[in-house]
Image (spheres, helix red, strand yellow):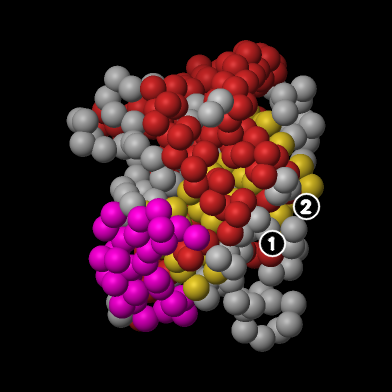
Amino acid sequence: MSSAMRRLVGSALKNASSSSFKTNVMPRRFYSSGGSPPPRKVVVLGAAGGIGQPLALLMKLNPLVSKLALYDIAGTPGVAADVGHINSRAEVAGYMGEEQLGTALENANVVIIPAGVPRKPGMTRDDLFNINAGIVKSLCSAIAKYCPEAIVNMISNPVNSTVPIAAEVFKKAGTYNEKKLFGVTTLDVVRAKTFYASKAGVPVEEVDVPVVGGHAGVTILPLFSQATPKPNSVLSEEDIKALTKRTQDGGTEVVEAKAGKGSATLSMAYAGAVFASSVLKGLNGEPNIVECSYVQSNVTELPFFASKVRLGEKGVEEVLGLGFLSEYEKQGLEGLKSELKSSIEKGIKSASEN
């Protein structure tokens, strides 16, 4: 890849933080030592898939990554060879099949899990559950064995259930650390920013919209009352409802637009890379890194909930509160709790089986 192309990619990936603290997949240099970034190994589980391949590309471009391990049940050597030719810092290795999973995970700092089947037309996130739950349980058992100290970024759907599944697997293994398990909900933030900017008539690269709750349908609650910058003209209640609905249905919009030939892979890979970059910045000691994420939480009565999270050297540094909510958002919050609670319980039950 030419230097001009890399600059273009870096420019396109700017300003994607879910908070006022802007993130960038091609981050500025910030290291407490004042020199080169510390070595960090990132593992992508499911690297040959529709999300995994573009995610691998974006992580290869991230200068905070020194080693990039790509794992899948098939096809990974080719992806690793292709991505590995890019002239950036990370050393790339491909691993394929269950017998190589342990080697892929050894000494990992961050493990990103996009593995699983994609959503197809007419398929709900719950339809994904039986297949993806088994995949997540297997991969998390390996993480507990080979890299129990790693930060885990869960992309595999349904995230509302797969994060509780992972927590239970880690608890059984005696390795659970609530500060190191994240459900990646950054795509909801990315969509909310894009849709809001278009409607509000403001530069999208300057927009911040927190998104709380969960990562499916009505459990996704964008807080447009907290959106910045303020719109050029006041958005009506109907506008806010329409923006909220579109954010909640963003995945379905892509599935239908692809007419049965895929789901949100490119935008999800971008969102996953943005969040992973923020996690790496936190690990490296950069202050005030805030992203929305689905984590173990006391913000509500639910055990897991997505809200703003301050990231640090141990993962979760602080789970932040919801802040001001409009009446419409308060209603949305109460309305999502039942479904989110059910999804969490479904995940915990699944993890207890077999």
Instruction: Name above or below for residue 33 compared with residue 140.
Output: below
Q: Horizontal placement of 342 versus 82: left or right?
A: right
Q: Position of residue 190 (x, y in %)?
A: 49, 44
Res 164 quadrant in image? top right
Amino acid type at image mark 2: Glu
Residue found 46% across the figure and 76% down from its top = 90
| Residue 317: mark | 2
Query: Can you give x and y, in whole percent of width and height, for residue 91 in the image?
Result: 44, 77
Query: Is 283 a magenta residue?
Result: no
| Residue 208 visible at all | no
Q: Quadrant of the N terminus?
A: bottom left
How far apart marks 2 and 1 lie (CA) works out to 9 Å
Q: Earlier in the sequence, mark 2 or mark 1?
A: 1
Instruction: Say which residue label 1 marks.
Output: 282
**307, 199: nearer the viewer:** 307
Give the image location of residue 66, x and y in percent: 52, 75
- Check disc 1: other Cα within 10 Å, few if <14, some if 14-19, many if 20+: many
Mark 1 residue type = Gly
Q: Residue at x 55, y 65 (%)?
A: 106
Q: Check disc 2 and report its element: helix, strand or loop.
A: strand
Q: Quadrant of residue 226?
A: top right
Q: Is residue 288 above or below residue 171?
A: below
Confirm whether the magenta stretch covers residue 90.
yes
Does 128 sit left or right of 348 as displayed? left
Contact, CB < 8 Å: mark 2 with mark 1?
A: yes
Q: Which residues are magenta?
A: 74-102
